[in-house]
Image (cartoon, rainbow, N blue to C red):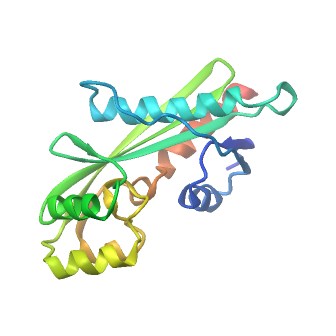
Amino acid sequence: MNFPAIYLASSSPRRRELLSQIEVNFSVLSLEVDESSLKNEAPIDYVLRVAIAKAQAGWNSLDYNEQKPVLGSDTSVVLDGEVLGKPKNNDDARRMLQRLSGNAHQVMTAVAIVNGDRILSEVNISNVQFSELNESDIAWYLATKEGVDKAGGYAVQGLAALFIDNIEGSYSAIMGLPLRETGLLLTQLSEQME
């Protein structure tokens, strides 16, 4: 595939790794975007809005002569209709892991590309089944600090893989960027740019 060169509106090492995996030529834009949810906002609407906001903020930060399409993405762990964000502290992370223990949850990852006034976007929804965790499992995982800056307090690509019984959907989306959807959007973008 011959994808266009883009900017990635994220400092996530996982998203950089995933884009490199599918041979996308990209530069990173590090910027702050308000990720607060709106009152009564559905989780799918939330992840899509934030992904678009990141891509839009990236586009707006560019000088005219450096404009290339900007990709933004957002991932949320959703349990019983509630978004579990990044844990605020160790107690919050413990609470999240206790809630995930023995339960299935959804991981919703939106990807958006902004190119001028054009916005392309997709959302991937995957299902993850956690095994039953005892307090020593949780204490061990918290001590690793792996889940500190991750939605839901865990990283599927790391040590938390020991806790996952089953995945239905996209492993890359659970990591933070749905590669199938990203590839389709980049192909669509490429056709629009011809």
Q: Residue at x 49, y 49 (%)?
A: 180
User: In the image, residue 83 lies at what x, y percent?
Assistant: 27, 43
**Could you tell me which quadrant the C terminus lies in?**
top right
- Position of residue 163 relative to residue 109, above or below, is below
Q: Residue at x 35, y 54 (%)?
A: 88
Answer with left or right where residue 95 lies relative to residue 145: left
- Viewer-nearest residue: 29 or 94: 94
Q: Quadrant of residue 167?
A: bottom left
- Viewer-nearest residue: 187 or 167: 167
User: In the image, residue 135 lies at what x, y percent?
Assistant: 15, 77
- Position of residue 66 relative to residue 170, above or below, is above
- Viewer-nearest residue: 129 or 13: 13
Q: Residue at x 62, y 21 (%)?
A: 118
Answer with left or right where residue 31 lies relative to residue 99: right
- Viewer-nearest residue: 151 or 88: 88
Q: Residue at x 16, y 71 (%)?
A: 131
